[in-house]
Image (cartoon, rainbow, N blue to C red):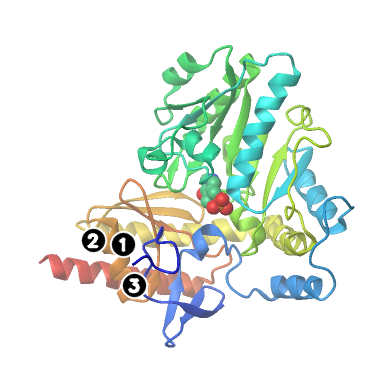
Amino acid sequence: MISAILPTYNRAPFAFVSGEGSWLTTTDGRRFLDLGAGIAVNALGHAEPRLVAALTEQAGRLWHVSNLYQIPQQQALAELLVDRTFADTVFFTNSGTEAAELAIKMARKYWHDKGWPDRTEILAFEGAFHGRSTGAIAAAGSEKMVKGFGPLMPGFRQLPFADEAALRAALNEHTAAVMLEPVQGEGGIRAFPDSFLKTLRKLCDETGTLLILDEVQCGMGRTGRLFAHEWAGITPDIMMVAKGIGGGFPLGAVLATENAASGMTAGSHGSTYGGNPLGCAVGLAVTRIVTDPAFLAEVNRKAALFRQGLEALVAAHPNVFEAVRGQGLLLGLKCRLPNSAVIEAGYAEQILTVLAADNTLRLLPALNIPDADIAEALKRLDAAATRLDRDAA
Ligand SMILES: *Cc1c(COP(=O)(O)O)cnc(C)c1O
């Protein structure tokens, strides 16, 4: 018999009732160290006092009004994002998938309005993840996501990961945009090399192609810069944001240049909930904290500390782990044993990590994780690996 909850997830056998910082407490009182952070969502950990205050204060006043009216919290968050990024304009959504949908629509409308209605193709890369809508699965194109859901939305093509020759060959008079995550999350914490991103930007400039970056997972301070593309010294034309920007409240956004957004006129797009006062009050609190250069400096310091420990962990358990991947606090452990076995051993040590493709384990702690919790995480990961070494012996 089918479960009351549609069985699309393989769930771990525990539930949490409360959280504080990097810790979660189960219904039966066990405390887990959380290196998943809701898959990079709880950017400031659980129950961060400033976010709780922003939410409860707004909740007592006004939850929702339609986008038919001015929304001051939305205006303030948009202005802050415009001030701190490449973007000239922002549209708010409730999720990353919805941001992907708008990014795709925006790119196609751009070319339509420029008088090139045949420039509709969007190039993406193998290993990509852009969400679960019909457009987003067509963009990613992996069999796991698309099988059985056809016919797929046409106009997408997947190129081999970071393959410059394939990119050059694919760009033509039908290309509307290139879409990619600077660091693939679900794909296994795989970063596109800076040199590739620079070349990509140059090729987009030469051909007028729009560059869409999906920073839903790698953005909002996760890599140690506000957005991951900053490391490569490039800017996109359109960018998707979600996950961390709400700190746990459902919120997403599409940021764009004035040029890229030029087709999006009144009536061309909308959202009932996107940019509501509650979400934007929390998003504003998160973004004010995360955009502080001193905060980002701390993320980089913590990341270096964690990474050093992880390198030692890999060296100590060569039968379990192969390598450390990623940037900032978007970290991956490429595993030798099946990553599902490593995650289970972690559960036994009461530490939460997240699976990714390419037999990788994702470590996405809160960006403000205390140093003591990093040390504790390394201890627990070592205990989990020791458990696996012992079982294998
Ligand atoms: C999670 C994710 C999405 C989808 O976001 P949802 O909020 O689940 O719709 C899109 N792109 C990337 C890179 C993601 O990590």
Res. 366 image quadrant? bottom right
The spot of residue 54 in percent (x, y) is 76, 70
Q: Residue, x 39% and y 28% (percent of image)?
A: 160
Res. 46 image quadrant? bottom right
Please state which amino acid type lies under the numbered disc 3: Tyr
| Tag 2 near tag 3, CB within 8 Å | no
Number of dots carrying numbers: 3
The answer to whether residue 143 is above or below residue 242 is above
**Between marks 1 and 3 in the image, the one whose residue lies nearer the viewer:** 3
Mark 1: give few (<14), some (14-19) or many (20+) Cα within 10 Å. Answer: many
Mark 2: give few (<14), some (14-19) or many (20+) Cα within 10 Å. Answer: some
In the picture, measured across the screen, residue 107 lies left or right of residue 378, that is right
Which of disc 3 and disc 2 is earlier in sequence? 2
The answer to whether residue 390 is above or below residue 67 is below
Q: Give the labeled residue for mark 2.
A: 317
* Tag of residue 347: 3
The spot of residue 374 in percent (x, y) is 46, 69
Q: Give the labeled residue for mark 1.
A: 313
